[in-house]
Image: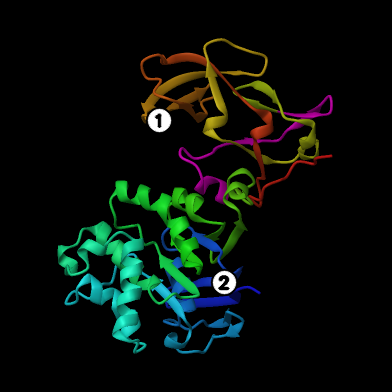
Amino acid sequence: MPQIELRNLHKGFKTGEVLKGLSLSADEGEIVVVFGPSGTGKTVLLRLIAGVEDPDAGSISLMGRDVTDAAPETRGVGMAFQNFALFPHMSAYDNIASALTAHEKSAATIKAKVDRVGALLKIGHVMQHAPRELSNGQKQRTALARALVSDPRILLLDDPLRNVDAKLRYEMRLELPSLLKTAGSTVLYVTQDYKEAMALGDRIAVLLDGGFAQVATPAEVYLEPATLGVARLFGDPTVNVVPATPVLQEAEPVFEIGGRPLRLPAHYAHIAGRTCMIGIRPESLVVEETASPESFPVEVVAITPLNEKSVLLLRTTDGRELLAAEAGNEEATRRHGPAHARFDPNAVLVFDAASGRRIPPHLN
């Protein structure tokens, strides 16, 4: 039975409708990351589940119980906010314990639970510090500890790593999945960082235009994006997009880049004559000095070294700009100027130009 079940949720404000018939379910112990750009309604969704806001229509069920009209304190939900929301006059210990004191737990129970979650999050040494004495990383862990301490069956995390430094953000991406699995809660985790979504989620729910454009595993979202909009959100640099109307030659669809005909696999034969957008991930583009039957001429316009990889800005003979990503720092060996590029035809993504939806291959 799903621990969280949202059915046809609608929510609007004076500026317009934010959520438009949104539905989602999450199973016990599952981490579902709600991902999308700023302003798409991710925080609004969490506030609806927590009971802070009321939906205009639709229903919310938690642990098999309809809580659409239930008071927030009866929902059994833990929540951590992106701005920490710590009580400034309380120590870290008292901030964490406040979730238990509200339920009139005994002092011994409170101490045991606070000490346990403090050790788990490695903040035991700052328990008597006031929030103003804590680093952003310690504040973040304190807010998370407060959400975890009462062992909530359902945990809502509103972009909790947004206000911490890059080093801690990276460390917490590694630690959080096992930490959340240890807690055993069913988690909805909001973020607008695609790397965070890929690292933390059992599934990712991509929120766009008031609804979920795709709900799938991280691998599926990246390799089989439901729409061009989803494909553009995942990847750095973003996916290259080439408009095309392929024609069939010897049972294979052919399209052009820079006047050069390039073949796609036969399992894309059904796209012949259809106006498409061909998506090529930058890491799928290989830039070489010499031409090959599968390559097309380009000019290397700029090279940006990013330590673990280099990003190349390429320009085709018809003026189209493409991005390629190469492993390692190629600045010393890679030269600007004429070159040739090729890609793995089996790695392309094909989208319908009118709807933006991905056109899957016909595999036997």
- Residue 333, x across and y down, in percent: 40, 14
Q: How many marks?
A: 2
Q: Quadrant of residue 142?
A: bottom left
User: Image check: 26 left or right of 359?
Assistant: left
Q: Amino acid at mark 1?
A: Glu
- Residue 31, x across and y down, in percent: 53, 62
Q: Residue at x 31, y 70 (%)?
A: 115
Which residue is labeled 1 in the image?
308
Q: Residue at x 58, y 69 (%)?
A: 28
Q: Earlier in the sequence, mark 2 or mark 1?
A: 2
> Where residue 208 is drawn, which disc sits there?
none
Task: Determine the secondary structure under disc 1.
Answer: loop
> Where does the magenta region start and end?
229-254
Name the one closer to the observer, 3 or 257: 3
Which residue is labeled 2 in the image?
20
Mark 1 residue crowding within 10 angstroms, few (<14) / some (14–19) / many (20+)? few
CB under 8 Å between callouts 2 and 1?
A: no
Does residue 308 show up?
yes
- Residue 323, x across and y down, in percent: 48, 30
- Residue 79, x across and y down, in percent: 40, 73
Q: Is residue 18 magenta?
A: no
Q: Amino acid at mark 2?
A: Lys
Mark 2 residue crowding within 10 angstroms, few (<14) / some (14–19) / many (20+)? some
The quadrant the C terminus occupies is top right
When the figure is inspected, residue 40 is found, relative to residue 332, above or below; the finding is below
Name the one closer to the observer, 31 or 212: 31
Does residue 83 show up?
no
